[in-house]
């Protein structure tokens, strides 16, 4: 595979640009929460956070979590959360906590008959804990909270992007095989060998090719060498287990030693991983370029 030297580097931080756009959209959801609190008799978010009456605070939280709102909260890819989940996430982020990773396991120990009541109880406890840690009113206003939300959405975006990549690298081989009447199967799940994960399996009756997908946004630094080692380890582990390996590397700037990887074929797309639409076109072209490999695998059945 020849690298495309004409591919321009993306100077702009596309990930940051997209995340900031989502955060700006989400301001309406924060504003709707502040409006709700004012309807409940609070001056602003900070006055609610400082509420001394636990019963009143919990009643307010229960009402908020149970109410429907036309305003939407968007995830790291710009997709709307369901209403109940959106409010749960907003409150958790506001209190500088992680709703899925840390709080969901705690819910089973929270007091309440319903899920809504358990959430209200837990959020109220977190409110009492967080209030003295952030005693300044401006720490609960939108400009500061926007930074908190940006960090939370960035973490979730990585996982969501990974899922989208997984779907893409499974869908495109099937598309290429169907268009060229190649009778090969694409595995529905990842496969793990000695702690190495391979996103795609291309399977014939006699042989399986493993395809790990490796992505990298940044262009330099010490992690570049680790990135190459990670690819090398995937290839070596597959080989030791008697599998052929064809890595898909999506990296704007990567100058790894291809010969040291000990694999006959490799797909390297010189693009920022955030350019998903353009990557889809290029990846399909690269898979078509490997028609000889896929047909050879089919003939061995």
Image (cartoon, grey):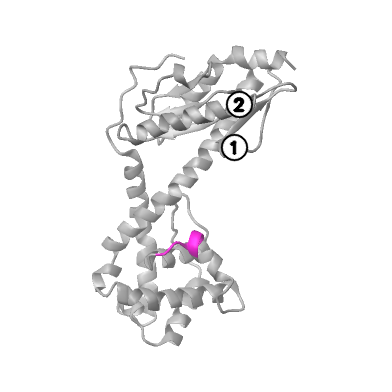
Q: Position of residue 136 (x, y in %)?
A: 24, 73
Q: Is residue 175 above or below residue 101?
A: above
- Looking at the image, which residue is at 53% across and 42% down? 163
> SS for tag 2?
helix
- Looking at the image, which residue is at 43% across and 85% down? 54
- Looking at the image, which residue is at 50% across and 60% down? 100
Q: Which residue is disc 1 drawn over? A: 194
* Mark 1 neighbour density, 10 Å: few (under 14) some (14–19) many (20 or more): few
**Is 101 one of the magenta-colored residues?**
yes
Q: Position of residue 89 (x, y in %)?
A: 46, 63
- Look at the image and give the residue range highlighted in magenta: 97-102
Q: Earlier in the sequence, mark 1 or mark 2?
A: 1
Do the residues bearing badges 1 and 2 touch, measured as CB atoms within 8 Å? yes
The quarter of the displayed image where residue 31 is located: bottom left
Q: Is residue 225 above or below residue 60?
A: above
Q: Position of residue 201 (x, y in %)?
A: 63, 30
Residue 240 marker: 2
* Residue 77 visible in the picture: no
> SS for tag 1?
loop
Total count of labels: 2
Q: Residue furthest front?
A: 240
Alpha-carbon span between mark 1 and mark 2: 10 Å
Position of residue 193 in the picture relative to residue 260 (left or right) = right
* Mark 2 neighbour density, 10 Å: few (under 14) some (14–19) many (20 or more): few
């Amino acid at each position: 595979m020849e690298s495309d030297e004409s591919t321009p580097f993306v100077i702009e931080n596309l990930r940051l640009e997209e995340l900031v756009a989502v955060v700006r959209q989400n301001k309406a959801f924060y504003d709707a929460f502040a409006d709700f609190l004012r309807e409940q008799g609070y001056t602003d978010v900070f006055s609610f956070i400082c509420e001394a009456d636990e019963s009143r605070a919990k009643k307010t939280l229960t009402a908020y979590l149970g109410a429907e709102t036309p305003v939407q909260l968007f995830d790291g890819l710009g997709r709307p959360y369901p209403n109940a989940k959106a409010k749960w996430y907003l409150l958790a982020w506001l209190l500088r906590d992680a709703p899925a990773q840390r709080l969901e396991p705690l819910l089973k120990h929270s007091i309440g008959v319903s899920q809504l009541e358990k959430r209200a109880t837990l959020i109220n406890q977190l409110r009492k804990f967080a209030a003295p840690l952030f005693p300044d009113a401006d720490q609960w206003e939108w400009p500061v909270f926007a930074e908190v939300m940006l960090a939370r959405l960035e973490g979730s975006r990585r996982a969501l992007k990974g899922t989208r990549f997984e779907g893409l690298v499974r869908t495109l081989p099937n598309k290429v095989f169907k268009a060229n009447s190649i009778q090969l199967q694409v595995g529905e799940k990842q496969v793990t060998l000695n702690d190495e994960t391979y996103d795609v399996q291309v399977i014939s009756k006699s042989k399986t090719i493993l395809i790990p997908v490796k992505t990298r946004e940044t262009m330099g630094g010490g992690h570049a060498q680790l990135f190459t080692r990670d690819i090398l380890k995937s290839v070596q582990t597959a080989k030791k287990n008697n599998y052929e390996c064809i890595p898909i590397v999506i990296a704007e700037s990567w100058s790894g030693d291809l010969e040291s990887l000990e694999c006959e074929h490799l797909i390297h797309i010189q693009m920022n991983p955030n350019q998903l639409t353009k990557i889809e076109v290029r990846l399909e072209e690269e898979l078509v370029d490997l028609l000889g490999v896929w047909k050879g695998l089919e003939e061995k059945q």
